[in-house]
Image (cartoon, grey):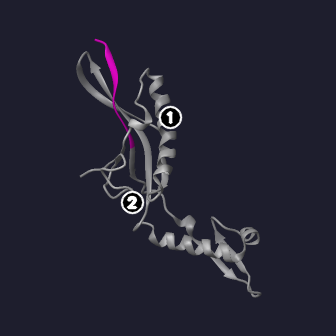
Amino acid sequence: MQVELRVERVERRLSLDDISDAEWLRTESATTDDGRLHIVKSWRYSDEDIAKYGAAQVSAWIVEDHRRLAEFGRDWWFVHLEAVAVVGVYAGETRIGEVEVRSLGIGGVESDADRSHFDDLSAEELSQLRDELQGYGLAMPADDDIPYVCSESWLVTEWQCGREGLRCPA
């Protein structure tokens, strides 16, 4: 008996990225004896940034980063985005199983990012998935026809579930 593979569903799947943290937003700075700002420890800024952009600008960035860090886990979090195809396995017209084919996925996406940022990232994931499926002789729908699917209704803070192509659990 011959087995046939059929792409049944393709999704841009969003789930909580519980591995990531936002400590890269934390900066320790000090004021030197002569009143100048000095970066003690930071993943983002250095004394060269102070020289280039000025102490006032770098201080403003640090304050914004610390505000953002304080909101992490409450007002925003990181999500994982991947493209997933559900492929049905058929023997004749009888469905005998399914497999999921996935893109590599990308984590650390800020939940309150603009929709366009998610669209840009998902285009890369969909391209990976399309290449994978083509290797099996399978096609998938156009990107515009592929919905976003959330694992949790609260996951993406800037969209409303049921709108803008976002499907969430009830």
For label 2, count other residues whose C-alpha is less than 10 Å away and answer few (under 14), some (14-19) or many (20+).
Answer: some
Amino acid type of the residue tagged 2 in the rendering: Thr
The residue at 34%/55% (across/down) is: 160
> Image quadrant for the N terminus?
top left
The residue at 47%/55% (across/down) is: 114
The residue at 44%/36% (across/down) is: 143
Nearest the viewer among 104 and 159 is 159
- SS majority, magenta: strand
Question: Residue 157 got which mark?
Answer: 2
Disc 2 is placed on an element classified as loop
Question: Residue 104 got which mark?
Answer: none
Q: Position of residue 63 (x, y in %)?
A: 57, 75
Q: Is residue 41 above or below residue 110?
A: below
Magenta part of the protein: which range?
Answer: 1-12
The residue at 24%/24% (across/down) is: 95
Which residue is denoted by mark 1 in the rendering? Answer: 127
Nearest the viewer among 76 and 2 is 76
Q: Position of residue 5 (x, y in %)?
A: 34, 22
